[in-house]
């Protein structure tokens, strides 16, 4: 009988260790590593910088303007496209600044086309270069507006997804 009681007590301890103590012991070993692993955070991002020359530059005030696709919002109430407005910082310590379009500015869906009017410092840009900032304004540097507006077709806008590129060329013009 004593052997039976001893056997039952040992069996009870073994079951207790197996069912309760072993998971607790494993948890104590695993949890500190899991908590440390869960606390790790990693961030990856790209950096760049454009440092202009001190003599001549034409840069958007918001660098995201030329890095991301810009949207011209369409109003279903007025059936008009809102223009894109941005501000540029310009400087030419040796003369004026000229600008032109590198190609015609328009949006297209593959079938239909929406022409764009591009004005820089209130001067409409064409394929021919024009002075957009005088030498006296450009010498100290200043901020000027850019406006890109859709020219509404005579037969109204056709439904679809339109895409396009505006390519502007700026020149430092000597006096």
Image (cartoon, rainbow, N blue to C red):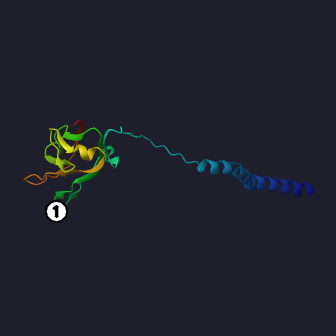
Q: Residue furthest right?
A: 2
**Residue 125 image position (x, y, % from top left):** 17, 44
40 or 3: nearer the viewer: 40
**Residue 71 image position (x, y, % from top left):** 26, 51
Q: Residue at x 27, y 51 (%)?
A: 86
Image: 116 above or below 73 = above
Q: Is residue 26 left or right of residue 141?
A: right
Numbered circles on residues, count: 1
Quadrant, the C terminus: top left
80 or 30: nearer the viewer: 80
Crowding near the residue tagged with mark 1, few <14, some 14–19, many ≥20 C-alpha atoms within 10 Å:
few
Q: Residue furthest left?
A: 154
112 or 103: nearer the viewer: 103
**Residue 82, quarter of the rendered image:** bottom left
| Residue indicated by mark 1 | 78
Q: Is residue 38 left or right of residue 131?
A: right
């Amino acid at each position: 009988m004593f052997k039976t009681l001893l056997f039952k007590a040992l069996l009870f301890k073994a079951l207790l260790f197996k069912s309760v103590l072993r998971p607790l012991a494993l948890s104590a070993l695993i949890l500190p590593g899991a908590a440390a692993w869960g606390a790790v955070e990693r961030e990856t991002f790209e950096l760049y910088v454009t440092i202009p020359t001190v003599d001549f530059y034409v840069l958007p005030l918001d660098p995201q303007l030329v890095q991301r696709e810009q949207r011209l919002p369409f109003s279903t109430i007025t059936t008009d496209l809102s223009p894109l407005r941005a501000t540029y910082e310009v400087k030419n310590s040796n003369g004026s600044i000229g600008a032109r379009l590198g190609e015609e500015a328009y949006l297209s869906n593959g079938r239909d086309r929406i022409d764009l009017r591009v004005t820089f410092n209130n001067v409409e840009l064409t394929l021919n270069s024009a002075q957009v900032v005088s030498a006296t304004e450009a010498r100290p540097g200043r901020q000027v507006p850019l406006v890109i507006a859709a020219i509404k077709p005579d037969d109204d806008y056709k439904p679809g997804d339109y895409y396009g590129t505006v390519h502007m060329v700026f020149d430092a013009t000597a006096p």
